[in-house]
Amino acid sequence: MRLAGAPDVGVEGEIIEVDPPRRLVQTFHMVMDERMAAEGFTRLTYEIEEGKGGVSKLTVIHDLDGAPVLSVLMPGGMEDRAGGGWSWILSGLKTLLETGTSLETGPTNQR
């Protein structure tokens, strides 16, 4: 991200609720862009449920009330400028957990 001109700190926040291993709630404040920084904090919740056969279900809930610019970015509405939002982040996490390799360095993305 730094190579693309992003600042050292792009997101700030704090943990406001923890219930291991089921739930994590934090504040989320995107500060890498002046318009998003002006919107203030949103709320991000991760919920993990144990499934059958050792599979877990991760649900990410991002409450974007009062953050219209961020609400376009996080679902991936600005892919040409910001990488694809939560779809991109969660796809990367899934690939890392399944293969031990990130999307950027995986076999299909090597040049």
Image: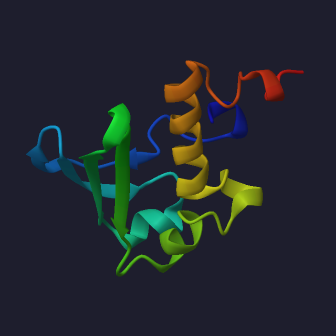
- Residue at 36 percent of width and 49 percent of height: 58
Looking at the rendered image, the quarter that the C terminus falls into is top right
**Where in the figure is residue 12, as x and y percent of width and height?**
33, 47
Comparing 109 with 55, the one in front is 55
Farthest residue to the front: give it: 53
Q: Residue furthest right?
A: 111
Q: Is residue 48 above or below residue 8?
A: below
In front here: 96 or 28? 96
Give the x, y percent position of residue 2: 62, 32
Which colouring convention does the figure follow? rainbow
Residue at image position (54%, 40%) is 7
Image quadrant where residue 77 sits: bottom right
Is residue 52 shown left or right of residue 19? right
Q: How many marks?
A: 0
Q: Is residue 70 above or below residue 6?
A: below
Q: Where is the N terminus found, in terms of image quarters?
A: top right
The image shows residue 50, relative to residue 26, as above or below, that is above
> Where is residue 96 drawn, in percent x and y?
54, 27
Q: Residue at coordinates 26% horizontally, 53% vertically from top-left?
A: 47
